[in-house]
Image (tube, rainbow, N blue to C red):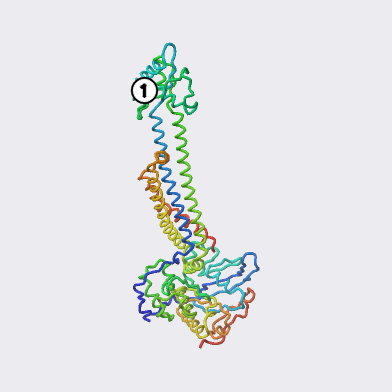
């Protein structure tokens, strides 16, 4: 690879890029999925979000990537109160947040290259401006030989690496992942984890929702633990480093 | 193989998947609507021409009913009436109808040969009027009175007004039908847009996450439906022109049918604007619908 796909952003500051203050969330008339959740993610930090199924991990991520709105409480992203954020400004904020899903959510009618090039294309950049970036990034995630392939022809690990490439091509400030290793084997899970750590090293604030306790333990990264929609006070740090 | 892929020659693929079965159903409906609208337009033009023809014929002639008085024989009264009316400005010709012709005109009501020979039937004067500046019934009536002839003038204005009303009604019905077809097209496209947004939820979701605005996403559907509607409308309009041409050729030898619906060759281009109109309606409807649906998202 001729150069790094992500240049280092501004020097890391302790400013919180995500701040939840007493946030609760319910779908319609259902019981609350999140209850009085408060936390901060500092710029350049790396956290795991753990908890059993139904504990509210995915909902918490949805609130950060603006796919849902709170029932109560206040969320600030990049210092901006989401309740005061105008609808026309939401897409610009989304462009600063990359999201990776367990089920990949790739566009099957587009090639690997087209999928990875989605964000700069939507941002209105000319193909000549980002073609090389996309090619470099795909090579970096190990898909340099698969750029022409269609997603259904990819393995689970390849799909997830493509999903990561698509999420980070615009060099987002925040990178969210919802069970990113849920559909890949252990070795590929570790490889994907290293990709996230590398992206964090070059400046992205990373939050990964996972119930893979072994993977979380190996990472040695701080943990936000959700239990029944509440943030447990004993999140702490995972103990092992990834091998 | 990757060797076949040259990133420098790459060009973005369409963001929406190619058309599928649902789109073909929509295109068929749009083509059918365009076909019907095309026939309505041709029919309206032909109907308008027929109305105008009938009206021109009516305002170009008048009839005078003459009753013999005193020592005048019916023939003498008719001759005097024709002479009096001929002198009125706006009259090109006035001639007394043969009594046999006059009797033939009332035969349908009383039956042939049923008229007693001694019955004093009124004489009729056929009057041809200057079509550009026709004489009025009042002027002709005045001239007849001055000539001492007991007669009534019928300038066909009653029939002319009725025909104009009928013609206006035909045009109004055609315009209403046209508006109804356009509204139906809009409704169909609105439904298809909602369906399209639902069916391609995963694409919309991916675009949103990548930072697309509502307007960007709506534009994709707008362009898709406008292009499809233009193509389908073009097919429908061509079919309507072909059908109208076939109707014209088939009715060529039938005078009554031709008089009723006098299609002219230039009428066949009436559906020509439909592809543009269809695309415009589809584009506006798809955009409004897509923006409304997308606004329901957080």
Q: Nearer the viewer, residue B41 or A96?
A: B41
* Left or right placement of residue B154 versus residue A181 in this view: left
Q: Nearer the viewer, residue A33 or B108?
A: B108
Q: Position of residue A93 (x, y in %)?
A: 48, 67
Q: Find residue B93 and report its horizontal and vertical position in percent.
A: 34, 24
Q: Can residue B49 be seen at all in this image of the molecule?
A: no
Q: Nearer the viewer, residue A202 or A27?
A: A27
Side (left or right) of B116 relative to B59? right
Identify the secondary structure beneath mark 1.
strand
Q: Spot the residue most to the front.
A: B113
On the question of residue A141 being in view, the answer is yes
Identify the chain of the residue marked 1, using the numbered disc in the image: B
Which residue bears the numbered disc 1?
Answer: B95
- Rendered residue at 58%/74% (across/down): A57
The residue lying furthest to the bottom in this view is: A243
Q: Nearer the viewer, residue B147 or B12?
A: B147
Q: Position of residue B26 (x, y in %)?
A: 48, 58
Which quadrant of the view contains residue B229?
A: bottom left
In percent of the image, x 54 and y 63: which residue is there? Answer: B297
> How many numbered circles does the render carry?
1
Residue B49, by quadrant, is top left
**10 Å crowding of disc 1: few (<14), some (14-19), many (20+):** some
- Report the quarter where the C terminus of chain B lies: bottom right
Q: Where residue B277 sits in the image (x, y, percent)? A: 42, 51
Looking at the rendering, in which quadrant would you find the N terminus of chain B? bottom left
């Amino acid at each position: 690879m001729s150069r790094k796909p992500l240049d280092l952003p501004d020097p890391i500051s302790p400013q919180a890029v995500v701040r939840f203050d007493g946030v609760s969330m319910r779908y319609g008339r259902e019981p609350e999925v999140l209850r009085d959740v408060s936390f901060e993610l500092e710029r350049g930090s790396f956290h795991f979000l753990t908890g059993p199924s139904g504990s509210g991990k995915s909902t918490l991520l949805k609130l950060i990537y603006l796919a849902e709105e709170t029932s109560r409480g206040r969320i600030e992203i990049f210092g901006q109160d989401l309740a005061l954020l105008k609808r026309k400004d939401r897409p610009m904020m989304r462009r600063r947040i990359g999201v990776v899903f367990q089920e990949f959510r790739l566009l099957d009618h587009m090639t690997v290259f087209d999928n990875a090039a989605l964000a700069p294309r939507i941002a209105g950049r000319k193909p000549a401006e980002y073609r090389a970036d996309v090619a470099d990034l795909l090579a970096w995630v190990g898909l340099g030989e698969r750029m022409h392939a269609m997603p259904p022809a990819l393995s689970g690990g390849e799909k997830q690496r493509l999903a990561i490439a698509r999420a980070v091509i615009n060099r987002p400030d925040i990178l969210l992942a919802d069970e990113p290793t849920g559909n890949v084997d252990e070795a590929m899970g570790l490889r994907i984890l290293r990709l996230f750590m590398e992206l964090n090293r070059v400046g992205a604030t990373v939050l990964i929702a996972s119930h893979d306790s072994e993977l979380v333990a190996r990472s040695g990264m701080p943990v936000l633990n959700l239990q029944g929609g509440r943030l447990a006070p004993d999140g702490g740090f995972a103990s092992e480093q990834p091998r | 193989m990757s060797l076949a892929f040259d990133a420098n020659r790459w060009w973005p693929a369409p963001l929406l998947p190619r058309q599928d079965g649902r789109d073909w159903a929509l295109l068929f409906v749009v083509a059918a609507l365009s076909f019907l609208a095309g026939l309505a337009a041709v029919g309206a033009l032909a109907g308008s021409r027929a109305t105008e023809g009938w009206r021109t014929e009516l305002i170009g002639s008048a009839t005078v009913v003459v009753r013999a008085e005193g020592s005048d024989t019916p023939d003498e009264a008719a001759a005097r009436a024709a002479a009096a009316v001929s002198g009125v400005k706006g009259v090109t010709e006035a001639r007394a109808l043969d009594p046999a012709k006059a009797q033939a005109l009332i035969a349908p009501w009383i039956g042939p040969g049923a008229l007693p020979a001694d019955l004093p039937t009124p004489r009729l004067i056929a009057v041809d009027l200057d079509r550009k500046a026709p004489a009025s019934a009042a002027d002709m009536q005045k001239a007849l009175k001055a000539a001492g002839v007991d007669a009534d003038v019928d300038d066909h204005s009653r029939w002319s007004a009725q025909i104009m009303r009928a013609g206006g009604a035909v045009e109004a019905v055609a315009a209403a039908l046209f508006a109804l077809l356009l509204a139906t097209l809009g409704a169909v496209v609105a439904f298809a847009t909602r369906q399209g947004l639902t069916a391609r939820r995963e694409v919309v979701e991916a675009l949103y996450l990548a930072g697309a605005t509502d307007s960007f996403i709506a534009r994709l559907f707008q362009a898709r439906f406008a292009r499809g509607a233009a193509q389908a409308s073009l097919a429908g309009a061509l079919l309507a022109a072909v059908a109208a041409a076939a109707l014209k050729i088939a009715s060529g030898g039938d005078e009554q049918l031709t008089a009723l619906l006098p299609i002219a060759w230039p009428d066949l281009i009436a559906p020509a604007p439909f592809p543009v109109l269809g695309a415009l309606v589809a584009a506006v409807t798809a955009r409004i619908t897509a923006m409304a649906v997308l606004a329901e998202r957080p």
